[in-house]
Image: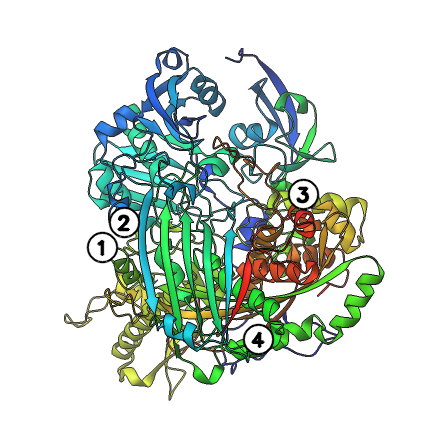
């Protein structure tokens, strides 16, 4: 049995401060989903391959299943719930809807975080750069075609056919 | 309207049917998207209940073993562990799930947990419930199970060998079901042929669509009523309940399935009844809500694989001009450790018996066996994909052997558009289509006229260029009567789906569906259909997301499976909306003092055609009947809440001849691709790819295109990388996304799309079910590899190492007999 250890951590998630006691072994994704009820980020694998749990931690794109919650102590985290404002979609979210870049929507939160991070650093990425940026996110519905188009549209570029 | 189908520098390839005014046929914004892009979807794992316990299943480390003992005592001592369940309890508290097969498969005993024996790695043998998922997982390691290992069986053909280990002693054999299908006159065809091409062995590999969201449920038990509520992602609750209720020894109304958003299913979420029954037993036993979320590794090892099939002794009689007269084959289908939805796969392929071809003489000797591998379940393209791979392999292998052109030989043998509706040798009716036209469009999209130039260019760079075609049919809307061709005692036939549409008190139009959407945009397309009939906009139509048994908007065969929503789901929506519209006109005519025929529904009003000023807004109609109805005639029999069951026009098939119409619609997919192989490494790249689709009237072209993209991606994964490979002891070698490589963004080639619309004469909207047709990608890649390598391709999945081996192997296994 794993020894029970817990400690209190403080994080800022989407501009809200939280202080919670967490088990040392708890993954950040489970902390976000189960303890903070921020269920937008998803779990699709056990191995860090699928990217459905991608979030920004202190501005860096990370898979939140690859990090313990205690490691995130003192950080500022952004999840899909932090995109857009006042219930309005941001340009990337709108482009995903306009270009049918999602079907079941399960990979979408992670995909949006990866694409957001790309666009923050590279406002006009090439198709190759877009594909590279979402390479760590698995989608089983779309074949990525319309996701690439949506990111192109969100960055004000012509959409490849 | 967004145009999604035209490549700017290319000619228009879309041949649309007549565009009617209205929302059907337009790319209206998807209703589902706003919540999903904000992370506000509700998937089953997002649902929480006070005091819920998390389940972890203790799973078999052996492919095949007797269970000597299970001891849960140490697990129960751990603080925070709420309880356990073992196979012994399950055997007392439940009955085995019913089997669809005749004997020997009928005698197989399948329970929620292993009873006495394990038959595949990952099979659940016990369950532990604790206050957290981590604790449940830890405590499950304290469950002591003593096994007596038995020899494992990991090959379908070996399962038939004398002396093979028997998985299910009560069945007395590893055969689930076997039967001979013999249509036309194969012997006469062989006598008439100028050549007979013989292929020793073809093998369709095991893979699955692996939805990104794993399976699971949150189960609540109501002690007062004896009723279970399952917040879950089951994609076929109607049939799930038919399995579960008798096993749990309760009436079907005790089982309530609730879904909202589902993270993909692809058929893989049809056979969840064993795990759900375990959760139901635990919820009752422990008196608390039970939460089960499958781990990815468990999904790969122990949930739902696609059928693996070996084709032996294929014979193809061919005329000198390339006309093929049919084929004969012996098929061995490996369904893993338990049949579950099987043996339906032993007949589903017969929906597309001759593939796209005019072949009249077909003999299939079909046997399904169990092995010590994960059970199978329907998987996008279910059973037809394996069979269509066979037909496409036949065409390309025959073409190669006889020096025929793969384009010309297809056109010579394709069913022709002027022959539609076309009756196949086994009585299926291909409703409409134009395969040759689709092929021409595909060839145009990949610049087929420059093939030889590109071949030379590749050669100059040290690469081998290959060209391949995949032609498939996506048969949709099952006639469940086909199950009686397997087992005459089964009481299933036809098909159905239900929808209700109501006008509520403030004028809200509310639609409930019996279907269980997983990303196909049902809320959106249902609203399009309703809006056109009621004279409002899709924004005015509220479609409840997901499925709930308590809505009473479903039937026994409800669900989202087998490419049918555009026919059955929207057929039900259309029927319900027309009933509601008639009631609205009737009520308005009473209020306005005119005949029902004088009333039209438009712009959110019921109004007099002759005098649009005399109008009642929908809100008034809703309020009058629901809240302000004094003075209405006492014999006025309307509810403004219309329920409609769509039933496709099916007859019972002829059991003796195994003959009849097994599906209502046949969408077409013709794919073509070019690949470049590096002969040094076996690595290859798809350098050009075209997918041409014909699903009749497209309700929402953007959604159709999304389905084409996704199905193609899954096919390309299955063609190039995805195999559930086992070692000789029955260990799965690809149990997660680390080892099982699904396509990532950089793996996908650009896909060029083209469409024609051959409306179905048999469906309410001229639409055909679609979405499962991606198998064409597997066939096209196999054909292209064969062309590039100059070697017969005999496996469906060809990773680089297989290509490398193929390049260095002798070409064997195909003979041509001249007559």
Mark 2 vs mark 4: give the one in front: 4
Left or right, A44 with reference to B655:
right
Mark 1 vs mark 4: tell me if same chain: yes
Q: Which residue is mark 2?
A: B100
Packing grade of label 1 (10 A; few <14, some 14-19, many >=20) is some
Q: Are marks 2 and 4 in contact (CB under 8 Å)?
A: no
Residue on which the image places disc 4: B409
* Chain hosting mark 2: B
What chain does mark 1 sit on?
B
Q: Are marks 1 and 4 in contact (CB under 8 Å)?
A: no
Q: Which residue is mark 1?
A: B490
Mark 2 surroundings within 10 Å by alpha-carbon count, few (fewer than 14), some (14 through 19), many (20 or more): many
Marks 2 and 4 sit apart, C-alpha to C-alpha, by 40 Å
In the image shown, does A19 or B685 lie closer to the viewer?
A: B685
Q: Confirm whether circles 1 and 3 share one chain.
A: no
Whether residue B288 can be seen here: no
Identify the residue position indicated by label 3 in the image. Answer: A113
The alpha-carbon separation of the residues under discs 4 and 3 comes to 49 Å
Q: Is residue B95 left or right of residue B416?
A: left
- Residue B792 lies left or right of residue B211; in this view the side is right
Going from N to C along the chain, the mark reached first, 1 or 4, is 4
- Mark 2 near mark 1, Cβ–Cβ under 8 Å? yes
The residue nearer to you, when weighing B762 against A63, is B762
Mark 1 lies on a secondary structure that is: loop
Please tell me whether residue B206 is drawn above or below residue B356 in the rendered image: above
* Letter of the chain that mark 4 sits on in the rendering: B
Estimate the x, y position of residue B613 in percent, counting from the top left: 40, 82
N-terminal of the pair, mark 2 or mark 1, is 2
At 67% across and 54% down in the image, what residue appears? Answer: B748
Check disc 4: other Cα within 10 Å, few if <14, some if 14-19, many if 20+: some
């Amino acid at each position: 049995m794993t020894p029970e250890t817990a400690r209190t951590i403080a994080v800022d998630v989407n501009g809200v401060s939280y202080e919670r006691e967490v088990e040392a072994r708890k993954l950040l994704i489970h902390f976000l989903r189960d303890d903070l009820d921020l269920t937008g980020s998803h779990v699709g694998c056990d191995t860090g391959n699928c990217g459905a749990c991608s979030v920004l931690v202190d501005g860096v794109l990370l898979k939140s299943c690859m990090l313990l919650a205690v490691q995130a102590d003192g950080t500022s985290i952004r999840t899909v719930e932090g995109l857009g404002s006042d219930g309005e979609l941001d340009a990337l979210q709108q482009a995903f809807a306009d270009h049918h870049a999602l079907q079941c929507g399960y990979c979408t939160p992670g995909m949006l975080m990866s694409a957001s991070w790309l666009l923050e650093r590279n406002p006009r990425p090439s198709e190759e750069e877009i594909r590279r940026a979402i390479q760590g996110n698995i989608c089983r519905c779309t074949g990525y075609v319309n996701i690439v188009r949506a990111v192109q549209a969100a960055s004000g570029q012509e959409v490849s056919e | 309207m967004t145009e999604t189908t035209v490549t700017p520098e290319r000619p228009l390839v879309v041949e649309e049917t007549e565009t009617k005014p209205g929302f059907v046929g337009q790319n209206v914004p998807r209703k589902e998207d706003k919540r999903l892009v904000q992370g506000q979807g509700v998937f089953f794992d997002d649902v929480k209940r006070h005091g819920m316990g998390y389940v972890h299943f203790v799973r078999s480390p052996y492919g095949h073993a007797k269970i000597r003992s299970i001891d849960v005592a140490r697990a129960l001592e751990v603080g925070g562990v709420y309880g356990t369940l073992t196979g012994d309890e399950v055997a007392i508290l439940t009955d085995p799930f019913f089997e669809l097969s005749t004997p020997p498969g009928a005698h197989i005993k399948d329970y929620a947990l292993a009873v006495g024996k394990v038959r595949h790695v990952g099979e659940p043998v016990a369950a532990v419930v604790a206050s957290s998922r981590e604790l449940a997982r830890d405590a499950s390691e304290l469950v002591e199970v003593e096994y007596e290992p038995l020899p494992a069986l990991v090959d379908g053909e070996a399962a038939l060998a004398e002396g093979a280990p028997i998985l299910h002693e009560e069945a007395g054999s590893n055969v689930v079901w076997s039967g001979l299908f013999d249509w036309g006159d194969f012997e006469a065809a062989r006598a008439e042929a100028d050549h007979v091409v013989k292929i020793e062995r073809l093998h369709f590999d095991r893979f699955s669509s692996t939805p990104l969201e794993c399976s699971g449920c949150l189960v609540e038990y109501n002690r007062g009523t004896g009723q279970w509520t399952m917040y879950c992602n089951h994609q076929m609750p109607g049939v799930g309940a038919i399995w579960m209720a008798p096993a749990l020894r309760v009436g079907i109304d005790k089982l309530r399935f609730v879904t909202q958003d589902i993270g993909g299913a692809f058929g893989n979420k049809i056979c969840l009844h064993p795990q759900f029954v375990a959760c139901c037993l635990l919820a009752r036993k422990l008196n608390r809500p039970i939460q089960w979320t499958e781990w990815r590794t468990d999904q790969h090892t122990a949930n739902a694989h696609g059928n693996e099939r070996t084709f032996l002794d294929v014979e193809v009689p061919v005329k000198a001009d390339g006309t093929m007269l049919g084929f004969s084959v012996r098929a061995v289908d490996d369904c893993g450790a338990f049949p579950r939805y099987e043996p339906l796969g032993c007949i589903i392929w017969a929906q597309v018996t001759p593939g796209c071809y005019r072949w009249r003489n077909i003999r299939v000797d079909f046997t399904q066996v169990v092995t010590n591998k994960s059970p199978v379940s329907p998987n996008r393209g279910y059973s037809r994909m394996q069979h269509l791979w066979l037909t496409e392999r036949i065409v390309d292998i025959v073409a190669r052997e006889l020096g025929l052109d793969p384009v010309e030989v297809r056109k010579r043998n394709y069913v022709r558009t002027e022959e539609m509706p076309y009756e196949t040798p086994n009585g299926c009716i291909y409703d409409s289509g134009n395969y040759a036209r689709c092929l021409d469009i595909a060839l145009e999209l990949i610049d087929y006229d420059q093939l030889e130039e590109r071949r030379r260019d590749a050669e100059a760079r040290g690469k081998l260029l290959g060209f391949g075609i995949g032609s498939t049919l996506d048969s949709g809307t099952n006639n469940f009567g086909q199950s009686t061709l397997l087992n005459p005692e089964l009481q299933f036939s036809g098909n159905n789906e239900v929808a209700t549409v109501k006008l509520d008190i403030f004028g809200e139009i509310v639609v409930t569906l019996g279907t269980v959407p997983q990303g196909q945009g049902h809320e959106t397309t249902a609203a399009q259909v309703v809006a056109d009939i009621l004279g409002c906009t899709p924004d005015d139509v509220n479609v409840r997301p997901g499925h709930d048994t308590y809505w009473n908007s479903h039937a026994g065969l409800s669900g989202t499976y087998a490419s049918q929503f555009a026919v059955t789901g929207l057929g039900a929506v259309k029927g319900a909306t027309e009933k509601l519209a008639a009631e609205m006109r009737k009520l308005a005519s009473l209020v306005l003092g005119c005949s029902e025929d004088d009333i039209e529904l438009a712009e959110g009003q019921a109004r007099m055609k002759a005098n649009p000023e005399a109008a009642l807004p929908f809100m008034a109609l809703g309020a009058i009947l629901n809240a302000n109805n004094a003075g209405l005639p006492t014999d006025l029999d309307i509810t403004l809440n219309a329920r409609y069951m769509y039933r496709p026009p099916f007859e019972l098939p002829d059991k003796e001849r195994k003959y009849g119409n097994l599906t209502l619609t046949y969408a077409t997919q013709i794919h073509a691709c070019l690949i470049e192989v590096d002969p040094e490494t076996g690595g290859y790249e798809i350098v050009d790819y075209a997918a041409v689709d014909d699903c009749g009237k497209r309700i929402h072209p953007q959604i159709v295109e999304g389905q084409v993209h996704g199905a193609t991606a899954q096919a390309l994964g299955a063609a190039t990388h995805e195999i559930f490979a086992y070692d000789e002891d029955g260990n799965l070698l690809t149990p997660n996304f680390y080892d099982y490589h699904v396509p990532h963004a950089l793996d996908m080639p650009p896909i060029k799309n083209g469409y024609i619309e051959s409306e179905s004469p048999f469906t309410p909207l001229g639409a055909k079910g679609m979405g499962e047709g991606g198998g064409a990608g597997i066939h096209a890649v196999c054909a292209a590899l064969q062309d590039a390598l100059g070697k017969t391709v005999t496996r469906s999945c060809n990773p680089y190492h297989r290509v490398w081996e193929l390049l260095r192997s002798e070409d064997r296994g195909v003979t041509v007999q001249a007559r």
